[in-house]
Image (cartoon, rainbow, N blue to C red):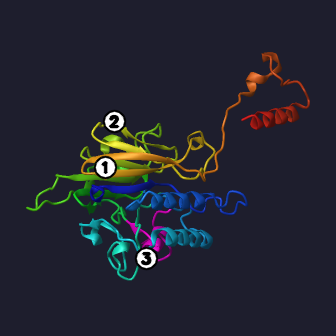
């Protein structure tokens, strides 16, 4: 029944605070993030899962932090029951400095739609003059507004401890790896210094039975960036079931067979366009993931609040006069003519 089905809203790369000083586009990132949380509420999601880059700046402005916290307060707090439990040792898998527990288990707060997130390359931990490495995610975590996982504090030894969740008879092992420098991570993976810890069974051995394994990652995908400057799909353990790939902004949210063939990869893409590139021009979506046992279904939901843009390419060589076009290279007013031609082309997009 419904008591066994996890409903998880998937979104990533919200880049809150992007172009915040722009009079027109300043609120775009917040509108899209708010829409994601609104959809999570509307569809009755158990929790929201984020694969990095909630913030656009490493040190978000006061305005950005204020608006983000206000949105999280409005959508994540409430008096409904949270219908799943965490089975793992929370001190090992979550970064929670005050209570050492997930935010919804804190008796002094009333969180009814938790958000779980890893950090991206825009909001990764840095030393701010002191000895402790802190991320903007730590601020939201210490204010009990999100559950920050997937952070590695040892640079040369990555041990990924899962957040183990259970709802009825469905069990999810949630693995996360916050953003690291791609070359370094690639080297460590080759040197077998990246370890995924598996859940223990009743008798203390590995418990492979019945866990649905999800992995959130925020790195370059292998798409012509050089073999050492990315994470290859073949590096991810073959027993994984579903990978959520953050960092890449193009929306390819439908789970696709990986090259390894044993797991599927979903790339939700960003919820706000931060560059005028071809991949960003596609329609933006968030996803509703439903998991029962080891079966899952992903429903993609188009975001209505995203400012769309059109893109096209023009080769000026094709519009030269001697090619039957409108521009004459010899004309002294070539620059003005070219400008008005380009304006016409943009208008017609």
Q: Which residue is labeled 2 in the image?
A: 259
Q: Secondary structure at mark 3?
A: helix
Q: Position of residue 106 (x, y in %)?
A: 35, 78
Which residue position holds label 1? 189
Which of the two discs, 1 and 2, labels the residue nearer the N terminus? Answer: 1
Q: Nearer the viewer, mark 3 or mark 1?
A: 3
Q: Is residue 173 left or right of residue 306?
A: left
Q: CA distance from mark 2 to mark 3?
A: 39 Å
> Does 319 appear above or below 220?
above
- Residue occupying the far front of the picture: 1
x then y, percent, for residue 257: 35, 37
Q: Residue 328's quadrant in the figure?
A: top right
Q: Which residues are magenta?
A: 123-148
Q: Residue at x 87, y 35 (%)?
A: 336
The kind of secondary structure element at disc 1 is helix
Q: Nearer the viewer, residue 17 or 255?
A: 255
Residue that numbered label 3 is attached to: 142
Looking at the rendering, which quadrant does residue 94 occupy? bottom left
Q: Residues within 10 Å of mark 3 (few under 14, many from 20)?
A: some
């Amino acid at each position: 029944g419904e008591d066994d089905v996890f409903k998880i809203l998937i979104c990533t790369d919200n880049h809150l605070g992007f172009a915040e000083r722009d009079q027109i586009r300043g609120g775009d990132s917040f509108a899209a993030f708010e829409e994601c949380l609104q959809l999570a509420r509307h569809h009755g999601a158990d929790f929201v899962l984020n694969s990095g880059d909630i913030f656009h700046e490493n040190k978000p402005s006061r305005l950005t932090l204020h608006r983000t916290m206000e949105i999280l307060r409005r959508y994540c707090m409430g008096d409904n029951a949270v219908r799943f439990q965490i089975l793992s040792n929370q001190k090992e898998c979550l970064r929670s400095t005050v209570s050492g527990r997930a935010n919804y288990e804190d008796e002094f707060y009333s969180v009814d739609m938790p958000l779980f997130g890893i950090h991206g390359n825009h909001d990764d931990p840095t030393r701010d003059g002191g000895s402790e490495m802190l991320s903007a995610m730590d601020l939201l975590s210490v204010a009990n507004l999100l559950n920050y996982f997937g952070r590695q504090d040892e640079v040369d030894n990555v041990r990924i401890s899962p957040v183990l969740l259970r709802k009825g008879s469905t069990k999810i092992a949630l693995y996360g790896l916050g953003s690291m420098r791609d070359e370094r991570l690639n080297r460590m993976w080759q040197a077998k210094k990246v370890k995924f810890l598996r859940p223990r069974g009743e008798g203390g051995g590995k418990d492979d039975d019945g866990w649905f394994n999800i992995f959130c990652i925020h790195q370059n995908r292998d798409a012509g960036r050089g073999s050492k400057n990315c994470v290859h799909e073949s590096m991810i353990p073959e027993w994984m079931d579903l990978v959520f790939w953050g960092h890449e902004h193009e929306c390819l949210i439908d789970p696709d067979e990986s090259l390894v063939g044993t797991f599927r990869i979903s790339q939700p893409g960003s919820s706000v366009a931060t560059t005028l590139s071809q991949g960003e021009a596609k329609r933006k979506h968030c996803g509703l993931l439903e998991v029962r046992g080891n079966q899952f279904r992903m429903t993609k939901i188009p975001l209505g609040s995203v400012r769309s843009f059109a893109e096209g390419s023009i080769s000026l060589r094709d519009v030269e006069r001697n090619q039957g076009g409108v521009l004459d290279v010899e004309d002294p007013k070539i620059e003005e003519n070219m400008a008005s031609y380009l304006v016409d082309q943009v208008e017609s997009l």
